Image (cartoon, rainbow, N blue to C red):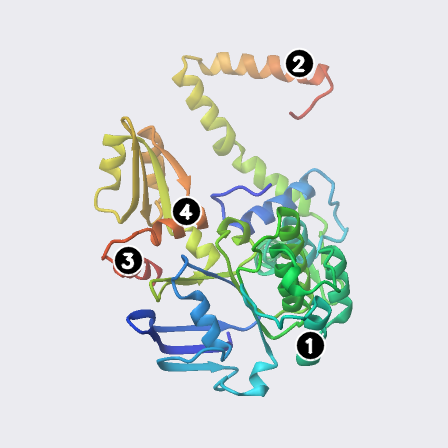
Amino acid sequence: MTAVIEVQGLTKRYKDTLALDAVSFAIEKDTIYGFLGRNGAGKTTAMSILTAQNFATSGSVRVFGEDPYENARVLSRVCFVRESQKYPDDATAKHALAAARLFFPHWDQQLADQLIDEFQLPLRTRIKKLSRGQLSAVGVIIGLASRAEITFFDEPYLGLDAVARQIFYDRLLADYAEHPRTILLSSHLIDEVANLVERVLVIDHGRIIMDETTEDALQKATNLVGPADAVDAFTRGREVIHRESLGRVSSVTFLGTLTAAERSEVSAAGLELAPVSLQQLIVRSTQHAGTSEQGAPAADLKEVAS
Amino acid sequence: MIEEGKPLFVQIAERIEDSIVDGSLPERSQAPSTNELAAFYRINPATAAKGVAMLVDKSVLEKRRGIGMFVPEGARELLLRERRDAFADRYVSPLIDEARRIGLSPDDLAALVREHGARLTETGRTTS
């Protein structure tokens, strides 16, 4: 696999906050990534630095093997759809799309026109006056029609209703199938994008805690439900990431999968096994609100991954 | 439409196998492309491709260069054989286990199967 982005020891410090803590990862060519994590985990900071819209405190970033800063060769091949893109006060969607058309060499006007129609985007209204959903539609249209070799979508769905989000996902898949390229999709609607993304990159407290195929991630954790004693006996010594109880029934999520023998043991004991969705796995892995144990679950997940 | 638990590419492969077994995707006909599968099931094309590759490996699909995927002759027979081999383990054993748990003997079970089989044939339903 060829990497189109290589990041080594990337650190970003804002005064006393460490937004990115010596992060290293590589992004493979022509792959759709889910770039996931909680608010403030460092997703937008990372994407801004990769697209030369922000400076790193330290570390190295290579996009197509080059430094992206003030590098038109690199930047014309990269599209960053920001969640809160700013436009000039009197700009209309028509202006924004015209500017994008000039900037991106692979721009497809036919696709843009089709999307304008599907999202029913008013072209002559000033962007300032557009609804949140219409503003998101402008970004989505630019992101798709630019056909940039690397496209970052930072929570592109804000304000889009379920129908409009489905249009986005469908067009993204269809266009990606025809014109393979690298896409990083940052989203909180994890279950909505789980089937679309080939790999997941999860960032938590400025560190990468998961970097693998979606399929492998889904195999990582198991949920066991049944009488508390039996569940406890079975999960003893395992890496438990979540536990909840209702009366004498426990539901425990742990890392790792079961062998066929263990599976029949579980069903003989009257326990129920359930798969863990990507959303559940990520919620469980990044759920340590306000505690100081940051990094601990991260280390566990990495060990299982390798 | 898509369930959790089994890897997605396995589920895609099973859907294709189902349509070969029930005849909606006949032998010698062209199978849906990876991109069509991806669009229809709303999944990543790489996942669809992995499901298709699995079927190519077991000769249930055949790649014809530049044209696409086809169902080769003998594919349905191969799947039927595979499913009949797995039938006892997948369906009969759990049936007997549950019957035993609720106090039905294998003979009671056989009688039930005959009775229900007859009823389904009568009403013209062969599957439920």
Mark 2 vs mark 3: give the one in front. Answer: 3
Residue type beneath disc 1: Ala
**Is residue A232 found left or right of A285 in the rendered image?**
left
Q: Which of marks 2 and 4 is in front?
A: 4
Nearest the viewer among B26 and A4 is A4
Which residue is identified by label 3?
A300
Alpha carbon of mark 1 to alpha carbon of mark 4: how far? 40 Å
Q: Helix, strand or loop at disc 1?
A: helix
Q: Which mark is residue A280?
A: 4
The residue shown at (62%, 65%) is A139
Residue with the mark numbered 1: A99
Q: Do the residues labelled 1 and 3 touch (CB within 8 Å)?
A: no
Q: Is mark 2 on a helix, strand or loop?
A: helix
Q: Which of A15 and A44 is in front in this view?
A: A15
Q: Which of marks 4 and 3 is nearer the N terminus?
A: 4
Q: Where, quadrant-wise, is the C terminus of chain B in this rendering?
A: top right
Label 2 – label 3 distance at C-alpha: 56 Å
CA gap, disc 2 to disc 4? 44 Å
